[in-house]
Image: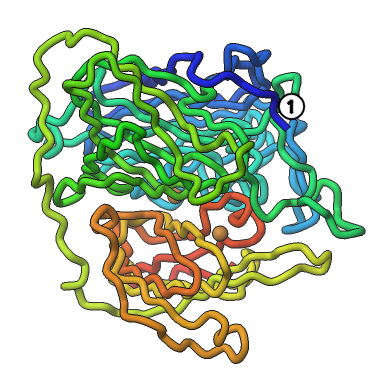
Amino acid sequence: MSMELEKFVDSLPIMNKLKPKERNSKGAYYEVTMNEFKQKLHRDLPPTQLWGYNSQFPGPTIEVDRGEYAKVLWKNNLPSKHFLPVDKSFHHLEHLPEVRTVTHLHGGETPPGSDGFPEAWFTKDFSEVGDSFERKVYEYPNNQRGATLWYHDHAMGITRLNVYAGLAGTYIIRDQEEKRLKLPSGAYDIPLMIQDRTFNEDGSLFYPNQPNNPAENLPNPSVTPFFLGDTILVNGKVWPFLEVEPRKYRFRIVNGSNTRAYQLQLDSGQEFYQIGSDGGLLSKTVTVDTLSIEPAERMDVIIDFSGLSGQTIHLKNDLGPNPDPDDQTGDVMQFRVNKPLSEKDMSRIPRSLSTIPSLKNEQITGIRNLKLVGTTDSYGRTLLLLDNKKWMDPVSEKPLLNSTEIWSLINVTNFSHPIHIHLVQFQILDRRPFDLERYNQDGQIIYTGPARPPLPNESGWKDTVTATPGEITRLIIRFAPFSGHYVWHCHILEHEDYDMMRPFIVIDPKDEDKSFGDS
Ligand code: C2O
Ligand code: CU
Ligand code: CU
């Protein structure tokens, strides 16, 4: 689809930091407007029509200190027609306004009315709102440890299109614990939002109307079961380069892609020093040569360029054995170690980073077995479900506030699903393989090996976990600090939209009589 675009001809954009409208001892107040605009994504591409927060793609970086209360007015100033193909054949979407938005802070411990519930959408100037809409100004307590979060659109049934159009940005919480560690900071602490896109000849974004080889009588447009772009962008530029000094840098890597997972490597053979995962610092620095990062996961890493003056290093995406020679997605970006060292590098790569209390020590009050399943709908399209239930089915997961549960994600499909749970940071207990063929014959789970503990770099706080195919992935989750309506879902956005997303309700026993109905 895309024309050949020369790699490494544009420098990496560093997103600007969002300035609050007001800031006082109680916190900060921000306003962000979603707009349609054009932006140059590559030297040789005409400007691309996009949707973004404050007319930029990705959106501005929001930075707060832990404990600093932030309020954000998310405003929708978008046109009433979508520029990407909207399928209205499911969830009664034909009755909803075509363009609707609601912002979610991914990884945030956010009160329910501000979490971006998919049915809390709103249109331009809030002229129409979804059934669950509660408030215009969202409130973020930021009472969680320092971490790299991200914000993105979450509107019912069109999240894949709104995020693809450009509605995503980085959100950083900083804390004292981290500051004491003397990690690379300031200009040497850089978010990298990695996304894949496909372009039409005129520079516009391509998104398929229908799956490949569509069945007859399929609605047009029709949701596709996955989407992989053929071009990689970092911070909104196609295959950019970054000029660096011979010193240590901290990169906060966010996989903001719809479906694509990456196996990131450095072609210098260097290792990454991973210091953080979704929910903040790991307990110890983990040295890895490959970062496997699924959609919505974050990996906070240090790369040490010291002693490498004059070298050019590439961040690659390992495509595995015998990749398609036309596949260009094995390249991500380039580092040019060509800047002089501006001052002595006093930053450190501490061996020990933080203390992470194990949730294993808590009393477990519930165990849920939840299947990740694939089936087909009445058109013969792929329909992916959580525990065989659709979004519209009654709420089945109702953990109690402050209780700790084990969720066993039983993946009976043939591929990995990055499963994300709102409100919480959880821990991965283990993964255990079972006989998938046998399961498909008679529904029995027969283990074929022992349970494996999580990898060292996923042993900290996580909000998104790779549920591997033919395995049971077990999580320990403490449901706090808020009660109310939330969602959990696969973060492959094509899956999330149709229909791998479910509501859950955290129940506060004190509110028992307030009706938390199954709606
Ligand atoms: Cu990143 Cu429910 O989302
Ligand atoms: Cu989230
Ligand atoms: Cu999925």
Q: Would you place residue 240 above or below residue 298 in this image?
A: above
**What residue is rendered at 22% in x and 24% in y?**
305
The image quarter containing residue 393 is bottom right
Residue 80 at x, y percent in the picture: 75, 31
190 horizontally vs 35: left or right: left
Q: Secondary structure at mark 1?
A: loop
The image quarter containing residue 403 is bottom left
47 horizontally vs 58: left or right: right
The image quarter containing residue 315 is top left
382 horizontally vs 385: left or right: right
Residue 290 at x, y percent in the picture: 34, 46
Residue 464 appears in view: yes
Q: Which residue in the structure is indicated by mark 1?
A: 200
Quadrant containing the N terminus is: top right
**What residue is rendered at 61% in x and 75% in y?**
388
Q: Would you place residue 378 above or below residue 59 in this image?
A: below
Callout 1, which amino acid? Asn
**What residue is rendered at 37% in x and 37% in y?**
253
| Extreme residue toward the right, this view | 217
Quadrant containing the C terminus is: bottom right
Q: Residues within 10 Å of mark 1 (few under 14, many from 20)?
A: some
**What residue is rendered at 29% in x and 11% in y?**
338
Between residues 139 and 268, which one lies in front from this camera angle? 268
Between residues 70 and 161, which one lies in front from this camera angle? 161
Residue 156 at x, y percent in the picture: 63, 50
Residue 469 at x, y percent in the picture: 50, 69
Residue 20 appears in view: no
